[in-house]
Image (cartoon, grey):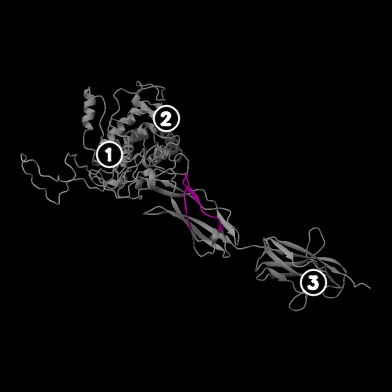
Amino acid sequence: MAAQFGRRLRRGATTTAVAAAAVAALSASQAPAAPHPDSAADDRTAAGATPPGDSAATGNSPYHTDLPPLDTPNKPGTSVNLPVTGSAEAGIPATVLAAYKKAEQDLASTDAACRLPWQLLAAIGKVESGQARGGKVDANGTTFSPILGPALNGQGFALIKDTDGGAYDGDSTHDRAVGPMQFIPSTWATWGQDGNGDGRKDPNNVHDAALAAGRYLCAGTRDLSLATDLDRAVLSYNHSTEYLRTVRSWFDYYKRGTHEVPDGTGVLPKDTDTGTPSPSPTPTPPATSSPSTPPATKPPATTPPTTTPPPTTPTTPPTTPPPTTPAPGATFGSLENAGTGTLTATAGDAFSERVKVRARNKLGAPLAKTSVTFTVVGDTDTRFAGGKRTVTLTTGADGTVTAPVLTAGEKAGPFRVTAVAGGTPPRTVSLLASVTARVADTLVRTDDKVLTAAPGAEFADRLEVKAAYKDTGVADTTVTATMITDAETPTANDKGPYFKDALGLPVRILTLKTGADGLLELPEIYADDTAGTYRLRLTTASGATLTVELKVEAPAA
């Protein structure tokens, strides 16, 4: 677990032989121990071998070795329901306790065969982080400051090079264990969970971390009601026999009874350091009373001459301070979609949705004043306002920034809009967008002439119509022209005006297409010998409809 807890002391009653024996049993080095005799192949260790540092959820980081008190929370045989009061060590902060119990319920519904007891999560949480530093979490269950372990740089710990770009642990060189349950980033990437339903998987959130730990412990076909499977699960979390003994001690203690205490009031292990760990400080030269430059005058005659130091040996600390690692709260952590809806538009229209993203710092909080570059990517003529393909904007106080309005071009098809921010490596959000071709929503005549013909003659005027989408002509629109009856439910008419086919025979239904500007001039229309008022209906596949009157009447005397 994390090094921010500093030196790990073993606490317990030392006035009895039993306590002395317990402390002696746990006084060995915290280096990963040989596998437990019951460890199985699915725990990825070979008998008698020390597993690699990243083979455990925590990377085999250090952990607290305090032991529970010898007196139990409840007398033997009493109820294990939470009492209102009890010993201080039996108290678990309210939000942390709720997270453990919720994780147990979730696993009971999704992996009932595992039989995960919440007291096991509580025991691991106690050993890993002192119950999230005594319950120092906000209302959502996120720690007020990150709980980070030491850099796993191979110097006293496992060697695990950076796997997350510093997104979780603020270290882009080596990994560190993170959060109340002390997951290393590479393990979190596989096992991370959203335990509180806020849409994020945050190792610093006790609900997310507890559920992830539960699923990790339940991996494979483990049944945690069996002692051997429980031991295997704990050893897979941190492969140390001492670690197993310590977790087992707290597990048995919590099973005998616990009680809820307010957040922030939980008992911390001894010598807990509540600060955030940082890389080993650069040694500071010892203070000296000598001036920073050699004196201009010789020493008094009574003072023996001194040997001039070698010119290559500095006499003062360097003027350039050692490089420092920015605080996680001030550095870029991640970029995410901030609720952008479906990006679709018809050719020539403005998109109703605008791309919106949120930048977060390494603690997961919104990060203001971060530059984000939005780019239209792909074979498309869609552009941001002003005809721009790329724009760069800065996030606001809530960490969000919204791209300008997108206007669809004439080219239909899919493309992408990307948002890029951060340094090395940059974080990218890529969203799919698409443009659909215009589809005619209206059919209109280009003039208002009355169309008339004498019986057995040709109509004097040709009919011209326009298929349009929002008054813009739509090319290649299929139009069906049908001579219809005058019934309430019109059907094709078998008499009255007609078109001619290629052989000169009468037809009363034609399928035609508009030109490049959406215009369509219908073929000549002929009248038979029956006078009367007839109707021609024009329709498109998209549902646009136009009905035109055709009059067949004898010329006036």
Task: Return the x and y of residue 306 as percentages of the image width and height.
Answer: 8, 44
Q: Read off the residue under disc 1.
A: 62
Residue type of the residue flagged with mark 1:
Pro
Does 98 sit above or below residue 158? above
Q: Earlier in the sequence, mark 3 or mark 1?
A: 1
x and y percentages locating residue 545 in the rendered image: 73, 61
User: How far apart in space, not on screen, are marks 3 and 1 (Cα)?
Assistant: 92 Å
Give the quarter of the image for residue 27.
top left
- Location of mark 3 (residue): 498
Give the number of marks. 3
Of 401 and 51, which appears nearest the observer? 401
* CA gap, disc 2 and disc 1: 26 Å
* 3 vs 2, front mark: 2
Query: Is 236 situated left or right of 370 in this image?
Result: left
Give the magenta part as a residue range. Answer: 391-406
Mark with earlier residue (2, 1)? 1
Instruction: Tell me, yes or no, whether the highlighted magenta stretch contains residue 546.
Output: no
The kind of residue tagged 2 is: Ala
Query: Quick check: 247 left or right of 364?
Result: left
What amino acid type is highlighted by mark number 3? Tyr
Q: Secondary structure at mark 1?
A: loop
- Which is more N-terminal, label 2 or label 3? 2
In magenta stretch: residue 397 = yes
Q: Position of residue 5 (x, y in %)?
A: 30, 36
What crowding class fits label 3: few (fewer than 14 Cα within 10 Å), some (14-19), or many (20 or more)?
A: many
Mark 2 lies on a secondary structure that is helix
Give the quadrant of the N terminus: top left
Image point (11%, 50%), residue name:
310
- Which label number is shown at residue 94? 2
**93 lies above or below 384:** above
